[in-house]
Amino acid sequence: MTRYYVALAAVVSLFLLVMLMAVMPASPVTGAPAAIPTPNAAVDRTNWPPQMYTFFNSAAMTADTTSSCFELANYDVMDVYYNIDQGTTNTTTLTLRFGNTESALVNGVNIVASNTADASGLQPYQTFGRYACILADVTTTDTITITVNALAK
């Protein structure tokens, strides 16, 4: 008789467990988090070896200036070197600009922002579109000398 009650208790417990799971509200289902994009694709570059481009070559500036634009559509990244020589304090921002035409450019990231002292640096940046230029934004008419070149790869 004890076996009968133990078996009955097991069946009833199993039934109650199944019913409990059936009536419980399900937790909301969410999708996987967005993946972090890979900054540079692994692309065969044998036909496009690294190329050096000079945006500003010791250019003396007293006003906002956009560099020459270069066609960089075949490159994924460029290592940008800049050197800012402040003759007198002239707050300067260097901004990457990209576009599919040379006349319709959009601002990208700042290479350096609100610079007020002599500075230099070398950083990699991703390229977009067909053309790349650099905008040198200065706040006064005091002369400042800027050099910017990039190794596209």
Image (cartoon, rainbow, N blue to C red):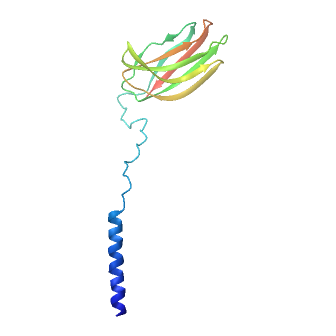
Q: Residue at x 36, y 26 (%)?
A: 74
Q: Position of residue 117 (x, y in %)?
A: 66, 18
* 145 relative to 95, above or below: above
Q: Position of residue 40 (x, y in %)?
A: 42, 35
Q: Residue at x 53, y 23 (%)?
A: 111
Identify the residue at the far bottom of this view.
Answer: 1
Is 32 positioned to the left or the right of 96 in the image?
left
Q: Position of residue 4 (x, y in %)?
A: 33, 89
Q: How many marks?
A: 0
Quadrant in the picture for residue 115: top right
The quadrant of the rendering that contains the N terminus is bottom left
Observer-nearest of 66 and 91: 91
Q: Residue at x 33, y 70 (%)?
A: 18
Q: Position of residue 125 (x, y in %)?
A: 48, 28
* 17 relative to 29, above or below: below
The quadrant of the rendering that contains the C terminus is top left
Q: Residue at x 36, y 62 (%)?
A: 24
Observer-nearest of 114 and 65: 114
Quadrant in the picture for residue 17: bottom left
* 105 relative to 143, above or below: below
Observer-nearest of 133 and 110: 110
Quadrant in the picture for residue 27: bottom left
